[in-house]
Image (cartoon, rainbow, N blue to C red):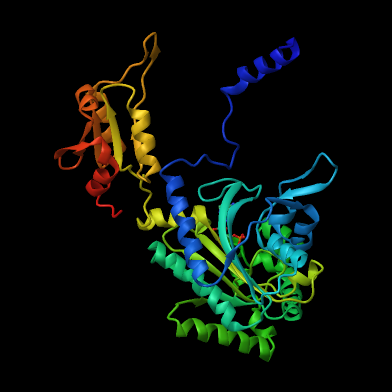
């Protein structure tokens, strides 16, 4: 090894003990990771049943893509992890997935209409971290692109509502609003801006800054100073055309017919610039206001076109996995449970466990074991029976498969039910069938 490599390695080793996960990120471990896998599996299954197919887009895209879709939003202007790659390209870690999915739609020109996709994965936003607000967080979501039909809005909202329900959540409120056509939304934004400017002096400093960029976003403010001003603000309703009103009525009627409860929230506007018509958000009433948004979405009829595609309507939602699981914790549902193994091999003869584990695992049985504490002059030495049984109980395995020297000689093994304590001697030749029978598995 040349000295410079050695030096570098030394420097790395010395600082290694100080490394921690970056601020706003977390290491997720079992059983939380098991819970997330189950969460994703359930989501995939439900969306699959509604004919949505999985899409996986890159975790980073050209910066320009996000600038195009969210010029006046904090998510894009203030919170983006953007960087120049080694080829001098301006890139960004994705802060959300709708832009990437629409970019993929424009790029691949799928023929299905609507093109219905679902996704799951991490997003990145440089936010001030707190409980339920991270710099890397995960979302699941759907996009349905190509059709403007209130029934599709209803389908998308119903899928999200049903998913929360399937997780066991009962305290989630659906807030619904419409932003009308892009022109109506613009007329409303202008009127709102004018109104807010007349009462500028009463607004909080943060809201004054937001007002400069996007008056609509001021409506999101939960700061008490802004309350009175916002209470008197004009609402979108006055700016809606007949068609937009009818569209919204159809969405409301569709949800009612499915028994999905909602509240109309005239001040609900969504973060990104491309929303029109239906917008919605799900609030977990079990969580405090700062983190109770568990998901949201809406219609974005201008987005595909703004990315260079043909005029194409679209609708979708994204649910925050981290926050939804916090809501599950608060309601004590969809609990994180470690997955116990089926069998724990207790090897008292030494040298038996590896083969037994492999044989059982190849047969589809979940198996664990202990390992030697030390590799001595005589090789590995088995742990005591007591230590191995303690490990078996800690692992929550259903059966212990015990082999000692006598069993090895006789070509048998002992199966012990770890909850009841009954024991049977089984032949090594029929091991798989005996274990399956003891576990109640059908062959
Ligand atoms: P948005 O794309 O902002 O509409 O976010 C959709 C959902 O993602 C929200 O309702 C949250 O549940 C979740 N979410 C957004 N930002 C964060 C974050 N910084 N940390 C955790 N979850 C987030």
In the figure, 73 relative to 249: above or below?
Answer: above
Q: Using the image as rendered, state which of residue 334 and residue 71 is in the foreground.
A: 334
| Residue lying farthest to the top in this orientation | 377
Q: Is residue 281 toward the left or the right of residue 38 in the image?
A: right
Residue 174: x %, y % from top left: 49, 71
Residue furthest to the right in view is: 88
- Side (left or right) of 287 relative to 305: left
Q: Residue furthest toward the bottom?
A: 242
Q: Residue at x 59, y 76 (%)?
A: 177
Number of numbered discs on residues: 0
Which quadrant of the picture is home to ligand 1? bottom right
Identify whether 151 is placed above or below 426: below
In this view, the residue in front, 375 or 161, is 375
Quadrant housing the N terminus = top right
Q: In which quarter of the image is residue 30?
A: top left
Q: Estimate the x, y position of residue 251 in percent, counting from the top left.
A: 56, 83
Pick the front one: 421 or 114 = 421
Determine whether 111 is above or below 344 in the image: below
Q: Residue at x 54, y 79 (%)?
A: 154
Q: Can residue 85 be seen in this view?
A: yes
Q: Residue at x 74, y 63 (%)?
A: 103
Residue 209 x %, y %: 73, 58
Q: Where is residue 226 in the image (x, y as percent from the top left)?
A: 61, 64
Residue at x 15% of width, y 42% of height: 420
Residue 332: name its quadrant.
Answer: bottom left
């Amino acid at each position: 090894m040349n000295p410079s490599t050695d030096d570098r390695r030394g420097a790395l080793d010395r600082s290694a003990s100080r490394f921690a996960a970056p601020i706003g990120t977390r290491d997720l471990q079992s059983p939380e990771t098991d819970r997330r896998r189950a969460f994703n599996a359930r989501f995939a299954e439900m969306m699959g049943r509604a004919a949505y197919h999985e899409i996986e887009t890159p975790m980073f895209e050209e910066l320009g893509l996000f600038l195009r879709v969210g010029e006046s939003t904090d998510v894009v202007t203030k919170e983006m992890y953007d960087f120049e790659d080694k080829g001098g390209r301006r890139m960004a870690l994705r802060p959300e997935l709708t832009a990437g999915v629409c970019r993929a739609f424009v790029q691949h020109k799928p023929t299905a209409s609507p093109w219905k996709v679902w996704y799951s994965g991490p997003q990145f936003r440089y936010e001030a971290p707190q409980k339920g607000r991270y710099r890397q967080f995960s979302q699941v979501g759907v996009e349905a692109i190509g059709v403007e039909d209130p029934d599709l809005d209803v389908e998308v909202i119903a899928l999200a509502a049903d998913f929360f329900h399937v997780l066991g959540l009962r305290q989630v409120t659906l807030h619904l609003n419409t932003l009308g056509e892009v022109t109506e939304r613009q007329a409303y934004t202008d009127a709102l801006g004018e109104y807010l400017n007349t009462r500028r002096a009463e607004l909080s400093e943060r809201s004054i800054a937001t007002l400069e960029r996007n008056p609509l976003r001021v409506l999101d403010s939960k700061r008490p100073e802004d309350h009175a001003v916002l209470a008197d603000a004009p609402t979108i309703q006055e700016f809606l055309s007949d068609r937009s009103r009818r569209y919204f009525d159809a969405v409301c009627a569709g949800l009612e017919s499915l028994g999905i409860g909602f509240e109309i929230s005239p001040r609900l506007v969504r973060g990104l610039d491309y929303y029109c018509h239906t917008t919605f958000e799900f609030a977990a009433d079990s969580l405090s206001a700062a983190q109770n948004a568990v998901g949201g979405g809406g219609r974005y009829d201008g987005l595909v076109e703004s990315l260079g595609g043909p005029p194409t309507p679209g609708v979708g939602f994204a649910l925050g996995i981290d926050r939804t699981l916090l809501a599950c914790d608060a309601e004590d549902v969809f609990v994180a449970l470690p997955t116990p193994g089926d069998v724990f091999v207790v090897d008292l003869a030494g040298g038996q466990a590896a083969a037994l584990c492999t044989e059982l695992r190849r047969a589809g049985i979940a198996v664990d074991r202990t390992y030697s504490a030390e590799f001595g002059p005589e090789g590995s030495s088995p742990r005591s029976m007591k230590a191995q049984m303690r490990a078996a109980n800690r692992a929550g395995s259903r059966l212990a498969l015990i082999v000692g020297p006598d069993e090895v000689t006789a070509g048998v093994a002992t199966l012990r039910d770890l909850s009841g304590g009954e024991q049977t001697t089984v032949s090594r030749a029929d091991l798989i069938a005996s274990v399956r029978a003891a576990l109640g598995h059908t062959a």
